């Protein structure tokens, strides 16, 4: 296949980890006979420095013209004092919106070689866990009406949550379809004992579940889900939930895997074009020092091959290469744990993954 990939390197460790993913993709391309063409565009702080905008129109146009988008990370102390709509992070909401990406996939997988890195006891982790969190990304309280007004106690602020049946159905379908390719179990998470939006969410999900008789379905309240994730994470296969609950639960799930430097994510919409990025930020404290763990970005590239291009064998090969490098004992500093060996840098980790391919 001939595929055009837009690269949004961004700030901090963004350029280092994107370069790693590009090397891995190039190797996969030469092994499996695909031609990947990479085109870089500006986003975040570097875009502010060079154009005055965190998300220049040329970046949006370039991404829309590509087959898929690979993003590093944005932000850093240099831009922290800018007003909200001029901050680098603003570009993230903007690009997701421009590309119509309403489904966020966040796998929280504990690699067997990294069992010791989980803060959970070994008897809880068991034979490792592999959860896929499907989060609604463009609706709910983050996008609802908001503002200030005079209330009972004087000035007050408010945010509102709204969800339509259409929005719930489309994210639900994404979750059930993914579950069919995995463990065939969906847990839908809401707060239906309190929120009206959650009651509609639950009713719509339950109706949808009837169209997927081969997938086991259950509802769970969000407060219970927060407990169950640390009590018995193995019970989950696919979790589907709203924007805000997904934001919080996916960070909790990532924490129980032990390292933020290992976790990939994908944002998808109605087309095969998606945006793929590590869940971590720009890590300004280690930028430019060859200390970043590139694995989250490399695994994001694997998700791109699987979900945007349908190249499952190629995606499997990247995941296997990462697994074998970790099993061989190679560790960047963030996942060193109690290893007696010295940590490897971003470059060396990338080289090992490329040769394991
Ligand atoms: P962060 O994820 O950048 O860093 C948190 C900690 O984890 C740091 O100690 C960092 O060194 C470490 N870390 C993160 N990724 C790592 C990796 N790949 N390898 C090794 N260590 C890694 O979060 P933060 O410090 O809260 O935020 C830094 C900047 O990133 C801020 O400007 C924030 O707004 C931005 N941010 C951007 C995104 C994004 O682009 N999607 C997401 C979160 C935060």
Image: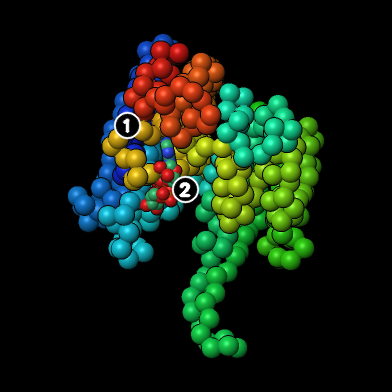
Q: Is 260 in front, or is 354? A: 260
Q: Mark 2 or mark 1, which is nearer to you?
A: 1
Residue 63 to residue 249: above or below: above
Residue 244: percent from left, percent from top: 58, 56
Badge 2: residue crowd in 10 Å (few <14, some 14–19, many ≥20): some
Query: Which secondary structure lies at badge 1?
Result: loop
- Which residue is identified by label 1? 290
- Which residue is identified by label 2? 100
Please report the residue visible at 79 percent of the width from the left and 37 percent of the height from the top: 216
Residue 21 to residue 121: above or below: above
Residue 343: percent from left, percent from top: 42, 26
Please report the residue visible at 70 percent of the width from the left and 54 percent of the height from the top: 222
- Left or right of residue 120, residue 219 in this image: right
Judged from the image, the quadrant occupied by ligand 1 is: top left
**Colour convention:** rainbow
The quadrant the C terminus occupies is: top left
Q: Tag on residue 318?
A: none
């Amino acid at each position: 296949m001939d595929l055009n990939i837009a690269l949004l390197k961004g700030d901090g460790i963004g350029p280092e980890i994107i370069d790693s993913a590009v090397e891995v993709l190039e190797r996969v391309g030469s092994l499996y006979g695909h031609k990947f063409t990479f085109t870089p565009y500006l986003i975040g702080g570097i875009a502010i420095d060079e154009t005055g905008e965190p998300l220049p129109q040329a970046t949006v146009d370039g991404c829309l013209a590509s087959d898929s988008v690979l993003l590093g990370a944005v932000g850093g102390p240099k831009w922290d004092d800018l007003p909200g709509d001029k901050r680098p992070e603003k570009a993230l909401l903007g690009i997701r919106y421009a590309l119509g990406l309403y489904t966020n996939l966040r796998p929280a997988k504990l690699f067997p070689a990294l069992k010791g890195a989980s803060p959970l006891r070994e008897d809880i982790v068991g034979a490792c866990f592999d959860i896929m969190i499907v989060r609604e990304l463009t609706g709910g309280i983050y996008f609802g009406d908001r503002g200030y007004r005079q209330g009972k106690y004087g000035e007050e602020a408010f945010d509102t949550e709204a969800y339509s049946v259409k929005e719930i159905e489309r994210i639900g379908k994404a979750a059930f379809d993914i579950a069919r390719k995995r463990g065939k179990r969906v847990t839908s998470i809401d707060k239906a004992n309190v929120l009206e939006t959650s009651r509609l969410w639950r009713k719509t999900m339950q109706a949808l579940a009837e169209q997927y008789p081969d997938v086991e379905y259950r509802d769970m309240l969000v407060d219970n889900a927060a407990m169950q994730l640390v009590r018995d994470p193995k019970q989950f296969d696919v979790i589907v939930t709203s924007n805000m609950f997904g934001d919080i639960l996916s960070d909790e799930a990532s924490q129980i895997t032990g390292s933020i430097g290992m976790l990939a994510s994908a944002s998808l919409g109605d087309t095969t074009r998606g945006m793929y990025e590590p869940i971590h930020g720009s890590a300004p404290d280690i930028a430019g020092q060859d200390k970043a763990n590139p694995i989250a970005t490399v695994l994001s590239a694997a998700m791109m091959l699987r979900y945007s291009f349908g190249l499952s064998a190629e995606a499997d090969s990247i995941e296997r290469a990462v697994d074998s490098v970790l099993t061989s004992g190679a560790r960047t500093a963030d996942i060193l744990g109690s290893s007696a060996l010295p940590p490897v840098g971003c470059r060396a980790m990338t080289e090992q993954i490329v040769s394991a391919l």
